[in-house]
Image (tube, helix red, strand yellow):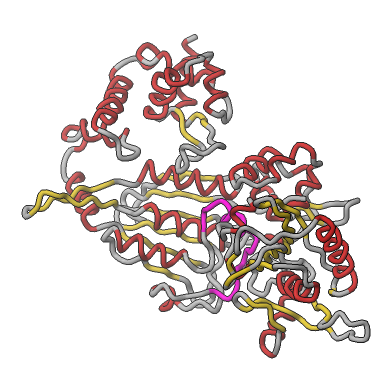
Amino acid sequence: MSLPIAITDLLHGHAVEWERLEFKKSWNPLDVLHTLCAFANDFHNLGGGYIVIGIEEDNGRPVLPPVGITQQEADRIQKDLLNLGNSAIRPQYHPIATPYEIDGKLVLVLWAPGGRTRPYRARTSLAKDNSERAWFIRKHSNTVKARGADEAELMGLAASVPLDDRENIFAKVDDLSRDLIVDYLREVESDLAKEEMKLPLAELGRRMGIVGGPREAPNPINIGLLFFHAEPWRFFPATQIDVVWFPEGRSGDQFTEKEFRGPLHKMIRDALGYIKATFLSTTVIKHADRAEADRVVNYPLEAIEEALVNAVYHRGYDVREPIEVSITRDELMIVSYPGPDRSVKEDELAAGRAVSRRYRNRRIGEFLKELDLTEGRGTGVPKILRAMSKNGSPPPKFRFDEDHSFFATILPVHPSAQAAAADLRGHDTAQVTEQVGTLVDRLDSELTRNELQEAAQVAADLRGHDTAQVTEQVGTLVDRLDGELTRSELQDAVGLAHREHFRRTYLLPALKAGFVEMTQPDKPNSRSQRYRLTTTGRELRARRRTRA
C-alpha cells in the first residue's frame, strides 16, 4: 500500500501540519487507538492525520535516522490494527497502513483520513474487563477526550460530513480520469505514481481516498470528481471562475467576460495565468533625489493568488453561483458564495487575526496543500495583507453580509499604477504609444533587453506582414497542435529532432505571438506542463486551412 503523498513531504511537514502528525518510537496499541479515533473524528475538518511508527519524536518533530521496526513487528501491528478497527472503535474504522524503508530502517505509516460516519468512540482501556468508551479529538498536537462543549459540538458533526468528502451516488468510478490522477500523483511526487498501472481504477481511488462504498458497488467521492473529472461542473453546476473586465467601471455599458472551467487546480492556474498576462502591469517610479527607481505592480499576483485559492477552497459546491473576478481600473474584486464561517468577524479579518473554527471543504484544502496552492490554517488573509503592503498598495478590504451569504475580497489598485493609466487615457494611445503597445503586448515577465527587442520584433512582423509568409515555422506548429501536448510531443508532431532549434524557432515565437499558451503558466518548468492553442491560434489555423 502507498500514501497519496511523498513520504519525504510527510516527514518534513511539507504537505500536512505538524498537529496532524504523530511519531511513535514503538508500537503502543492503546495510544495509537486513541489517536486514530481523534483523526477519524476530524474535529476541525482538516482531513484526518498520520501516525508514523518506528520514528522517535522530539517536541513533535521526527528524530532521524529512524529507530525502525522489524518485518515481524510490522506484520503483527497490521493484524492488531485490523482487530482494533473491528472491536475497539465504534463505528468500525480502519486506517491505511503503508510500510516504508528510510535510511535502511523499516517504518510503518498509518494514514487516518477523517471518517464519514463520525462521531467515533474508542475503548479507554484494552483490558478484558473494561468496556468503557470515550470520544477522542485533537487539541493542537495532543489527543484528548472530548468533554463538555467539545463533546456536544462533536455530536453535532454526526450529520455534517463535508460535501467534498461524501460519496456521489450519481457518478461512476469510471467518471474519474486516470490521466488526471496520474498527473497529480507525479506532481506531488507520490509513490502511488509508480504503482498506478498495476492497480484497477477503483483500487487506486480507494488508496487515494477518492473512492468509497462497498467493493461490489464502489462510488466516487466528490473530491475525486472535483479534481479528477475533466468537467466537474456536470456534477456541481456553476463550478467555474468568471473573469470580467469593466473598462468603464461596473456602472458602464461595456465589459468583457472569460469563463474558466475544469478540475479545480487546473481552473485556478488557468484563471491566474490569464489575469497575469492580461491585466497585470508594472509601473516604474523615478525619484529626483536618487538613481534607483521603484517598481510596483497594479495588483500583486501573490495577493490575487491567495484570494482566488481561498475562494475555491471555501466556496459552497452546492451553491449554483460561480466565483467572479471583476476588474476595473480602480480595483480587483473576487466574490464567492456563501460567506465565511459564522465565527469569523469582519474587524478581525481586516486585521489578519480571524481564525475559522470550521473549514467547509476539508478534502479540497488537503489536495490544494499537496499541490502547494495553499497553506491552509488561516494563512491566506495575512499573506494577502503582506503582499499588498510590500507592494505599497492600499490595504485590501473584506466584505460579507449579516447572513454570511457571500464573501468578497477587494484589492485596490496601486495609486501610481492608477495615475500612469490615467496619463495614457489622456492621449490618443493608437498614435502616441504604438511602440509602447507593442512592448506591452509581448512583455509577459521581466525579460532581458535582447529578449524584449526580439519579442517586439516578432509582434511587429506579425502585424506588418502576411503571417503565413513571415512565420511559417509558427504556422506549422499551429497546424500540428491538437489538444494539449507536452513539449516533446509537440516537437515530434512538428517533426524536429533538435530541441533548442524547435524551442527558439517554433515554440517561443508562437508563445510570444499569443497563438499558443501553457496549461500551467505559473509553473513553466512543471513536468506536467502542456501547450495548447489560444483563441487567436485557432483562428490562425482556420485561416491557413482556408487558404490551403
Q: In the rendered image, which quarter is residue 176 located in? A: top right
Camera-nearest residue between 54 and 408:
54
Give above or below for 219 relative to 477. below
Identify the magenta region.
Answer: 356-374
Left/right of residue 452 with respect to residue 8 in the rendered view: left
Left/right of residue 426 with respect to residue 89 in the rendered view: left
Q: In the rendered image, which quarter is residue 429 located in? A: top left
Q: Is residue 209 visible?
A: yes
Find the residue positioned furthest to the top.
548
Camera-nearest residue between 222 and 423:
222
Q: Residue 365 appears at what percent x and percent y?
A: 59, 60
Q: Residue 140 appears at what percent x and percent y?
A: 59, 76
- Residue at position x 30%, y 60% from top? 390
- Residue at position x 54%, y 33% from top? 530
Give above or below for 113 relative to 470. below
Q: Residue 103 appears at what percent x and percent y?
A: 65, 51
- Residue at position x 44%, y 66% from top? 381
Camera-nearest residue between 414 and 47:
47
Q: Is residue 365 magenta?
A: yes
Camera-nearest residue between 139 and 444:
139
- Residue at position x 17%, y 32% from top? 431
Left/right of residue 72 with respect to residue 193 in the rendered view: right
Q: Residue 362 appears at what percent x and percent y?
A: 64, 64
